[in-house]
Amino acid sequence: MANLARLARNGDLREIREVLCEYDVPGIVDELERLDSFARAVAFRALPKDLALATFEDLDPPLQRELVEELRDEAVTELIADLDPDDRAGLLEELPAGVAARVLSGLDPREQAMTTALLGYPPRSVGRRMTPEVIAVAVDATVGEALTQVLDQERHAETIYTVAVVGAGRHVEGVVSLRRLLVTEPTTPVAEVMSEPVTVRASQRQEAAARVVADHGLVAAPVVDDERRLLGVFTVDDAIRVLQAEEDEDVARSVATNPLRRPYLSTTILELVRSRILWLLVLIAAATLTVNVLDYFEDTLAEVVALALFVPLLIGTAGNTGAQTATTVVRAMAVGDVRFGDLPRVVGREAVAGLFLGLSLSIVGFLPASLVAGRDVAIVLALALLVVCTLATTAGALTPMLARRLGLDPAVVSAPFITTFVDATGLIMYFLIAQAVLGL
Amino acid sequence: MANLARLARNGDLREIREVLCEYDVPGIVDELERLDSFARAVAFRALPKDLALATFEDLDPPLQRELVEELRDEAVTELIADLDPDDRAGLLEELPAGVAARVLSGLDPREQAMTTALLGYPPRSVGRRMTPEVIAVAVDATVGEALTQVLDQERHAETIYTVAVVGAGRHVEGVVSLRRLLVTEPTTPVAEVMSEPVTVRASQRQEAAARVVADHGLVAAPVVDDERRLLGVFTVDDAIRVLQAEEDEDVARSVATNPLRRPYLSTTILELVRSRILWLLVLIAAATLTVNVLDYFEDTLAEVVALALFVPLLIGTAGNTGAQTATTVVRAMAVGDVRFGDLPRVVGREAVAGLFLGLSLSIVGFLPASLVAGRDVAIVLALALLVVCTLATTAGALTPMLARRLGLDPAVVSAPFITTFVDATGLIMYFLIAQAVLGL
């Protein structure tokens, strides 16, 4: 909305409010994400209070931080007090320590304690994202008693649809859905209707927990400590957010950029450049390998200039083939379809697939290549395609799996790195084949 | 589990059952997905009946189809009768028409009617994924009456946590959560506690509906027709599945492969090759452009062979820069951060970012390049990097946005195509700059 940006620049709060109030909360969030940070703060101030609270809650933490920096102290305290404990922990992490401390001290003691507890968990762990406001019923209660306990705790709970059943020391014995409680005879013991609990650990990575919630089709999962004591609850809406953030990151890393961690239009050009330049420098440094290879084979190249004609096509094809494999394997690892133990199987499959692909491309490319550059160079190209495609798929499968084994994010070392590696080794193969076939 | 594959080959059903029963349902699904289709059928037969039903429900439709083809007719009818109507529609779509008709005729009339209704919606529409088993209460009911109506319909409902409030002709007037109903005084009219309904349309694309559910943090959304009459409900677990399938597809398309639509290890090598070969052929055909360009500038190349040294580095960098932009923009469009109307803004930002990136790379690369190939060629390379990076980011932003406008999936024409295009145009720039600077 260029319109909204203009209204914000003119400070026309009444009109901004009218425009924004035609949207629902996700719509308002969308619109705010498209403004620069100054205009966003102006537009935000124009929102009626209840909408402002709901909107603030749904903004990405970096945008929340910017807003907090633009607003007056009282407004900030109120906004932050109104967040769920997990969202609050996410925001406080973003804020400069001084501001975070001031905000924390403005909370009531109960909220303060919950937020501090969450901040004690490692970043990106489930502990940071759970809400401690979980509903629990005693394992020796009847269904009727359990329902009463649920409704008693309702005011302070994020969800009441998934109920943890706990024994001594808040040890989680089972889970029962509110639905089950409602359709069961009130005198039945809870222990008889509860099911084996699907729990997540507070110290676990958020992404792993989110996949558990998604794979089991849950509305929420109880969060436990290592002794399986109840700490909180991790809900499906948080799981979706985690999965989407993870996806954003994987997509960014697959083309060697740092994740922006905020909506595209809310980034500055400088942030875009910063997210990309480092990796480009690394890749260009790696690409100097290709300069060395060509330099080494300069005599061969000078003798048969026609060889140079096919260099971009050959390394382009190798790069595409390698990227296909790397991205497929990275994705299969991310969704849990492939584990490290599958390495021999995966590499074997991909090597064979690469051979097939190289063979097909060689056959299709042979005739056109001989027309352009003669039969001999065409033979060189065909053999090179065969070797290079096999090399590319093998490297494309091996690299991400080994990276994961070494504790690196496989996405970081994927497609662009494999492309650059395959460029250099592919060129070596090409010239070695040329020397052999052409007798240079 | 090589172990499980071996047991399946030996047909050792009792041991297979023991191994599989140590997993929960998502675990069993994981294990089955790693087997070939014969072993999968054997292992599946070893499952106790209740686990078999639950497992079958969670398999991808292509794997369900293969199982159905391996099992006896009575077993199949039973499995399919037990599926939710939306899952059943998904499977029937996969089956050969004759088998589908036989399966349909084996269902009881109520289930048959529901399934046929779902199959009437276009593929990938919400209608195919919703369940018609939705809970509705009358808008003129009290909260107490509504609760009774909910519990009366419970047995046939997929979820009872989101309740549609309907008026005359099942027109959706609002939505109320079960939680709200439970904590409200029973004599209060439902109309007073219901909220503005967030609905999705049966004819809408599944992905768009899934984003609505995700963005609003819903457990379920009522599905309506174009007159806003209640047809069914679309639940968050289906929304997650849709988003993940969409993500699988986008990832595949981003490196020019066709989506596998099934877990990696359950595909054959031939299927892997098939998913990639077509696009590789298209890309290699496009790459012949680079052969033409080099052919055209062969004299320049023969005169200054040092120019050839930097060809892979230059086009590699251009490709990486273009891929970064294209993938970032495709993702921003997919999550709704960028729309077609933003085209001038996006292209402008990316062109400036490209200029910055090119400038930085030129500055860093100049000294090393002059050491290898002399000052003049280094000047050519620096200027070429500047031009080519700007070209790459601009093309990377423009292509996916125009593709979307033309009704194509932007992911299909993204990174690899842009890379190939930028390879060819980048080479032209490089040689034109070389001719100008070196006075050839």
Image (cartoon, coloured by chain):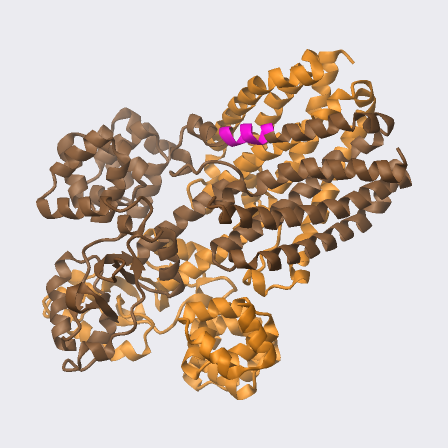
Chain colours: A brown, B orange
Does B160 sit left or right of A438 as displayed?
Answer: left
x, y percent for residue A192: 23, 80
Residue sitting at x 49%, y 36%: A257
- Which span is picked out in magenta? A278-285
Work out whether residue B121 or residue A416 is closer to the camera in this orientation and state it: A416
Does A130 sit left or right of A110 as displayed?
Answer: right
Question: Does the magenta stretch mainly form a helix, a strand or a loop?
Answer: helix
Work out whether residue A319 or residue B278 is closer to the camera in this orientation and state it: A319
Does B158 sit left or right of A389 as displayed?
Answer: left
x, y percent for residue A53: 20, 43
Q: Is residue B245 visible?
A: yes
Image quarter of the N terminus of chain A: top left
Quarter where residue B129 is shown: bottom left
A310 shown above or below A144: above
x, y percent for residue A440: 88, 33
x, y percent for residue A11: 25, 27
Quarter where residue A146 is shown: bottom left
